Image: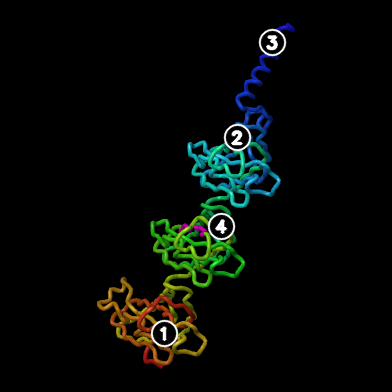
Amino acid sequence: MKKRRFGKALGFFAVVFGLTLAGCTMESDNNGGSGTTKLVEGEWKDGKISKEGQLKKYTFEVKEWTRYFIYMNNAWSGNDTKTGYTGIKISHSDGTTISSSYSNVISCYTKPVTFLSASSGTVTITMASCEGYTNISSNWEKGTGTYAIKYTSRQEYTTLSNVDEWHNDNIIANGQTNRYYIPVDAGKRYFIYMNNAWDGDNTKNGYTGIRATHSDGTVISSNYGDVFSRYTKPLTFVSANSGTVTMIMASCEGYTNISSNWEKGTGTYAIKYTSRPEYITLSENEWHEDDILTNGQTNKYYINVSAGTKYNIYLNDAWNGDGTKKGFVGLTIKYTQESNASNPTICSSYGNAIKLYDKPYTFTASSTGKVIITVASCVGYSDISGNWEQGTGTYAIRYTIGESE
């Protein structure tokens, strides 16, 4: 019996000795010696590579359509407490290789590596160390040293359900995009505002831009560089159908890089949206106060008309009014399609209906039905022949019936 016990002990020693020669070490971990450590979200996990050829493996569970961030504290990037020149490979249990080379992920203490998980499963991180500062292209699995690692996550999609409420957010990693949903109704105009380093209240440092698409397939903005300065002049669109608009937010590297380098920057920003009906029904002889907030916006109004009746349209604006308005506005008038008017167009040009405070635009209805009055703003005082729908400003509109005042 004693001889057999000695034989088992000798055999165990031989196995351990063999593993040591192969460059492997048997160290305790959080999984009872399985060789892999499970990470806890948001918590740094200290580690050490003590000999050439040693690898450390870590896992964490991931959910579909969730964005993950992996941080590493080491000799390249950290708090000066670590000695290892470490890098990581990252893979997903669905077969996706997130990062195939140690050299790709070496410095991620302040700017973590990020990825979007398209499916639920397990992510495995393999950690190795190289011999020194300049050896990131080779000599991996030959170094030693200490390090720490952690991960965090965020939902890939955030629903902005509160109208006119700023949502503060940030982009912390190269390659990161943040996505937002807003529910939209058919026949409404929407405005998307952004507070960032280009245009805002001087509290944000991200040079951010937006791409936006409607769930019906309509592309609202296809290029980040088209929508980057939207604090006072929001992006606007009219939703033809009810559904959802998805906004993708990205950051570029700096002030002058609006044509390229998107999804390579970081920084803070805020986003919000507002809405208004695309059509407003006017009440007879009542001034309706309104404004045009941004380039491309037009405001539309309904009035019901009777054949043979005279109508007068007044505008109070920066051209002609009581001195309280800032918009240089004009209008067009046409029958709705449902009115079946033989001559649907009443006024076809914004420039033909301006300065209407003292002398209104007057017409006699050729048919009974509903007409649409569209108000637009031009850039300035002298732009009545062009640049319509490019200006902003406040104004008021009203209509009367019968002989003008």
Badge 4 crowding class, 10 Å Cα cut-off, few under 14, some 14 to 19, many 20 or more, is many
Amino acid type at mark 4: Thr
Bounds of the magenta segment: 245-252
Q: Quick one: label 2 or label 4, which is nearer the N terminus?
A: 2
Question: Which label sits on residue 399?
Answer: 1
Pointer 3 or 4: first along the chain: 3
Query: What distance separates the C-alpha of mark 3 from that of mark 4?
Result: 62 Å
Front one among 255 and 145? 145
Residue pointed to by mark 3: 7
Please report whichever mark, 2 or 3, sits nearer to the chain's N-terminal start: 3
Residue 281 is covered by the magenta coloring: no
Residue 315 falls left or right of residue 113: left
Q: Nearer the viewer, residue 227 or 87?
A: 87
Dot 4 or dot 1, earlier in sequence: 4
Instruction: Report the predominant secondary structure element of the magenta stretch.
Output: strand
Q: What element carries label 4?
A: loop
**Residue position for label 2:** 142
Q: What element carries label 3?
A: helix
Q: Position of residue 236 (x, y in %)?
A: 45, 68
User: At which x and y percent is residue 261?
Assistant: 48, 58
Label 2 and label 1: CA atoms lie apart by 83 Å
